Image (tube, rainbow, N blue to C red):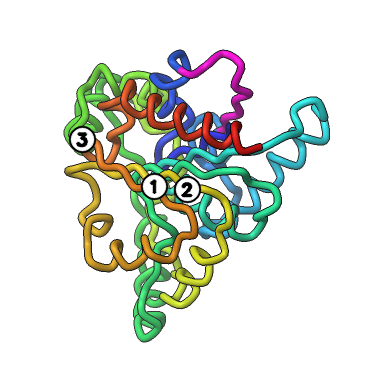
Amino acid sequence: MVFLHGWQDNLASFDSLIPMLPQDYGLLMFDWPGHGLSDHKTGDYHYPFFDYLDSLHQVLHQTLCSQPEKKGPVILVGHSLGGLVASCYAASFPESIAGVVSIEALGPIVEPEHKITERIAKSLNQRLNSAQKPPRLFDSAIKALQLRASINKVACQSLMPLVARGIETCGHGVRWRHDPKLRGEPLYRMAPGHGESIIRAIECPVLAIRATDGYPALRSADAAQRATWFKQLTLIEIPGTHHCHLQQPQQTVSLVTDFVTKIQTRT
């Protein structure tokens, strides 16, 4: 099982789930570039969506080549950004992925074609402006934790591992570790037709977990249409906000374990 965290999060996003998973599962977690303890991209290099697919591909290749005993069915478990990446990767390498668990994500984010020039202009201008902004500083780790809890609508205790891995001390206080360039709008989003093609190309079973108070787009008519494009989709709603796996870890683990058991039975 490969765990893929969300945007501006880190691998500690899954800390509460890991102890409850069966001990015989092989687990792989890492911080995306620019997140957590991973290095930032140098210079003016940013973080386009497709680079996350490349990062995942390299991690899987290096892990399986260096540890051939771990070769076997691969299940991707992604939250938010991680779920978007998981869906695109499973579509591109259907022979390599046995299942996908997508938490608060349902296929890639798309945008109407006519908005492309507006997006390019907005993104480039934003990059210029953000480069001049100093990093945000906090008096203490508690202040950073409280802000994150307020934004995510998640209890401080549930967010503590994620925030602890996501901050660092500096001469004037505490700041976020993740690269400030991550905050920029992407230069490009896929067109709706691309999103549909990707979803229809996913061959493996998909468990989609959405929150009752998560992203509204995942409970829209468009999301309902998307759900019909999956070949093998189980869609389950659980109480919580966008980080519902932190709020309902036991229920999340139960759903994931049942899903993986069914896949193991088939294989």
Residue flagged by tag 2: what amino acid is it? Val
Labels 1 & 2 near each other (Cβ < 8 A): yes
Residue 247 placed where, x, y %?
25, 27
Counting residues from the start of the chain, the first of labels 1 and 2 encountered is: 2
Which residue of the protein is positioned furthest toward the front in this rendering? Answer: 266
- Residue to which mark 2 is pinned: 206
- Residue to which mark 1 is pinned: 234
Q: Which residues are magenta?
A: 21-30
Q: Secondary structure at mark 2?
A: strand
Disc assigned to residue 149:
none
Density class for disc 2 (Cα within 10 Å; few <14, some 14-19, many ≥20) is many
Residue 251 placed where, x, y %?
31, 26
Q: Secondary structure at mark 1?
A: strand
- Residue to which mark 3 is pinned: 240
Density class for disc 3 (Cα within 10 Å; few <14, some 14-19, many ≥20) is some
Membership of 130 in magenta stretch: no
